[in-house]
Amino acid sequence: MSEAAGGIQGTAVTGVLHPGDMGSTVAAACSGTVLWAGEGRSVKTRRRAEDAELTDAGDLTSLGAAADMVISVCPPHGAEALARSVAGAGFEGCYVDANAVSPATARRIAERFDDFVDGSLIGPPAREPGTTRLYLSGPSANRVAARFEGSALDARVLAGGEPGAASALKMAYASWTKGTSALLMAVAALAAAEGVSDELTAEWALSQSSLSQRLAYTSIAVAPKAWRWVGEMDEIADTFAAAGLPDGFHRAASEVYERLEAFKNARSASVSEMLEALLSPAAAVENASPDNAG
C-alpha cells in the first residue's frame, strides 16, 4: 500500500481506532508500528495522533491491509458500527474491542472476526504506570498483552476468559463508579429543587464527609465527558437485565448523563451549573457557551 506499509513487513503492526484522549495513550503504549486512519478526523484528533507518534495510514481499508491487529477505542454507542466498518474493509487480523460494552455486544462484535479479543479499560488515560489496566479475554489475549509489556498500560489476561468476560468485568466495575456518580448528582439536584442544599451539605459534613468533595469533583471531571457515558450506562443496564437483575438504576443514570450533554468539550462546570442542567436540561442546552457546545 502506500507509505504506511512501507518498511514494516514482518514487524508487529497495530492499528488503533481512534486516538481520542484514552485511545491515544493506548496507542502510545503499544510496541511496534502503530497506525491510525486520519481520513475525516478532527484537528484535535490529528494533534493527539502526532503527539503519540502514530503513522497515518489514510483510510480504514489501508490501515486494515497493513495491520495484523486492530484495537478499537471509541464511545460505546459507536462500537458495533466501527466493527462493521473494519470487517467490511476486509480486515483479517486480530480485532480487539476495548470499549465499554455489554458482554452480549462484545459477543456480537466477535461474530464478525475469526480472531477476536474482548478488552476493557479501567482507569484514566494511561500516562503514568500503575494507573490503568487493559483486561483481555479470548484466544489471542496473550498476544495482545505482549504488545504492551513494559509500558504505562498494564495489560492483564483473564485466565480462561472467553470473549465477553473482559466486558463483564468493566460493566460490573463501572456500574458502581459511574452509577454512583450519577446518583450523587441526582441527589444534589433533588436537594436544590427542594431548597435544602445547605442543610444536606451540613449533614454530609457530619455523617458522610467525602460526599461534598466528590460532588465538586463530578462537576470538574465528570460533567464534560458525561456525553460519553450515556451509552455506557445503557450497556450496563442491558448487562443487568441479561443477568435477571433490575436495570432501572442505570437507565436512570443514562438519563442523568444525557442531561449534561451541554458541557461536552467544556473544561469543567460548576456544581450550580451542573445541577441547573439536571433540573432544566432544555435551558442548559440553550445557554451553553460555544466552548461547551462541542
Image (tube, rainbow, N blue to C red):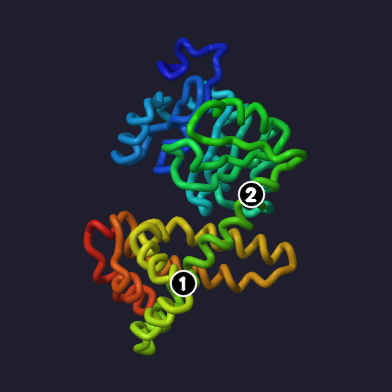
Residue in the picture at 40% in, 24% down: 55
User: Can you tell which quarter of the image residue 85 is in?
Assistant: top right
Quadrant position of the C terminus in the picture? bottom left
Residue 184's disc number: 1
Residue 92 seen by the camera: no
Residue type beneath disc 1: Leu
In the displayed structure, 25 sits above or below 220; it is above
- Residue that protrudes farthest toward the front in the picture: 206
Residue in the picture at 49% in, 27% down: 63
In front here: 41 or 155? Answer: 155
Residue 119: image location, x then y, percent = 61, 42
Residue 283: image location, x then y, percent = 29, 76
| Label whose residue precedes the other's in the sequence (2 or 1) | 2
Q: For numbered disc 1, what is the local secondary structure?
A: helix
Residue 80: image location, x then y, percent = 57, 47
Residue 226: image location, x then y, percent = 42, 60
Q: What is the distance, in whole Å, between disc 2 and disc 1 at their CAs?
A: 25 Å
Residue in the picture at 71% in, 69% down: 245
Residue 167's disc number: 2
In the displayed structure, 236 sits above or below 81; it is below
Residue type beneath disc 2: Ser
Q: For numbered disc 2, what is the local secondary structure?
A: helix
> How many marks on residues?
2
- Residue 42 left/right relative to 211: left
In the displayed structure, 109 sits above or below 116; it is below
- Residue that protrudes farthest toward the left in the picture: 290
- Residue that protrudes farthest toward the right in the picture: 160
In front here: 258 or 273? Answer: 273
Residue in the picture at 70% in, 43% down: 163
